[in-house]
Amino acid sequence: MVKSVEGVYRNGKVELIEPIAEAEGSRVIVTWVQIASSVDLRERGIDESQAADLRRRLATFALDWDRPEMNAYDDLPPR
């Protein structure tokens, strides 16, 4: 069985947000997820209102972008 559960790494241990009683004593694989930092809009040549407009126009694509299988593209090298 494979089950994904969110957790937090602290002091060398993973603290699960949602405990799994049936998993006690079983082996696990931990995947580290780095939280994206904020974007410097000025560095990209746009202001906050332009960024808001862009987010609004691209929102229709969010359902596809947020699908778990799309995460594979995050590891591609930049062009």
Image (cartoon, rainbow, N blue to C red):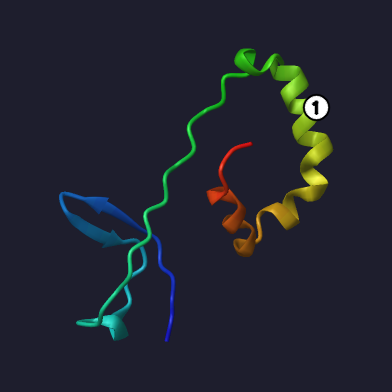
| 32 left or right of 56 in image | left
Q: Which residue is under mark 1?
A: 53
The quadrant of the rendering that contains the N terminus is: bottom left
Which of 26/74 is in front?
74
| 56 left or right of 35 in image | right
Residue at horizontal 80 percent and vertical 35 percent from the top = 56
Which of 38/21 is in front?
38
Does residue 68 lie above or below 52 as drawn?
below
The quadrant of the rendering that contains the C terminus is: top right
Q: Position of residue 22 (x, y in %)?
A: 30, 86
Q: Position of residue 76 (x, y in %)?
A: 57, 48
Residue at horizontal 33 percent and vertical 70 percent from the top = 29
Disc 1 element: helix
Label 1 environment density (alpha carbons within 10 Å; few <14, some 14–19, many ≥20): few
Does residue 18 lie above or below 55 as drawn?
below
Q: Quadrant of residue 41?
A: top right
Does residue 74 lie above or below 45 as drawn?
below
Which of 7/65 is in front?
65
Residue at horizontal 42 percent and vertical 51 percent from the top = 33
Q: Position of residue 51 (x, y in %)?
A: 72, 24
Residue at horizontal 71 percent and vertical 16 percent from the top = 46
Q: Quadrant of residue 70?
A: bottom right
Q: How many marks?
A: 1
Q: Looking at the image, which residue sits at the far left?
A: 11
Q: Quadrant of residue 52?
A: top right
Q: Position of residue 26 (x, y in %)?
A: 24, 82
Residue type marked 1: Asp
Does residue 63 lie above or below 49 as drawn?
below
